[in-house]
Amino acid sequence: MEKPPKKILIIENEAATRRVLVDKLTREKFLVSEANNGLNGLEKATGEHPDLIILDLFMPKMNGLEVLKQLHKESWGQQVPIIILTNLNDDHHIIEAIKDKNCEYMLKTNHNLTSLVEKIRSKLI
């Protein structure tokens, strides 16, 4: 019997980036949902309980660090693997984001879709 596909939530305000991620991850046989701002992303995350979240840091309505803080207020949110995928190369934000063992920080300019998919698969094993 085949395992059901893993659910991934992409919280990213840049439409072009979100579309590329949705297309690639759908082709990789993941169930993908998306949000274009932090508040909508937090609502989807708490409602859908995805297996993994891809999170940008700078977004309207609620930034990525605030989304992380809110997710970690409940036990499910403390357990879900989160990949922070951003253009921000700021040590303070990196340290803040990865202090949690379920968070991984990936700089958009340093990674391609293949390395992102590999990272996702390693987190979902």
Image (cartoon, helix red, strand yellow):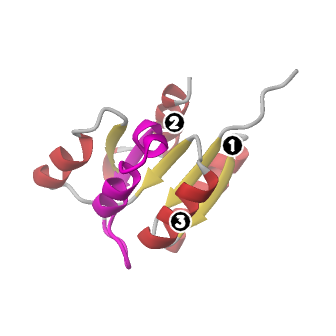
Q: Amino acid type of disc 3?
A: Glu
Q: Which mark is residue 120?
A: 2
Residue density around tag 3, few if under 14, some if 14–19, many if 20 or more, within 10 Å? some
- Residue at 34%, 40% in the rendered image: 103
Q: Which of marks 1 and 3 is nearer the N terminus?
A: 1
Are the residues tagged 1 and 3 within 8 Å (C-beta)? no
Label 2: element kind: helix
* SS type, badge 3: helix
Is 83 covered by the magenta stretch?
A: yes
Judged by depth in the image, the label closer to the viewer, 1 or 3, is 3
In whole angstroms, how far apart are the C-alphas of marks 1 and 3?
20 Å
Instruction: Please tell me which residue is depicted at 54% across the width and 38% down the height of the picture.
Output: 117
Q: Name the residue under label 3.
A: 43
Which residue in the protein does label 1 denote?
Answer: 30
Q: Which of 10 and 79 is in front in this view?
A: 79
Which label sits on residue 111? none
User: Is the residue 16 above or below the residue 81 in the image?
Assistant: below
The C terminus: image quadrant: top right
Q: What stretch is highlighted in magenta?
A: 58-87
Quick one: label 1, few (<14), some, or many (20+) residues within 10 Å? some
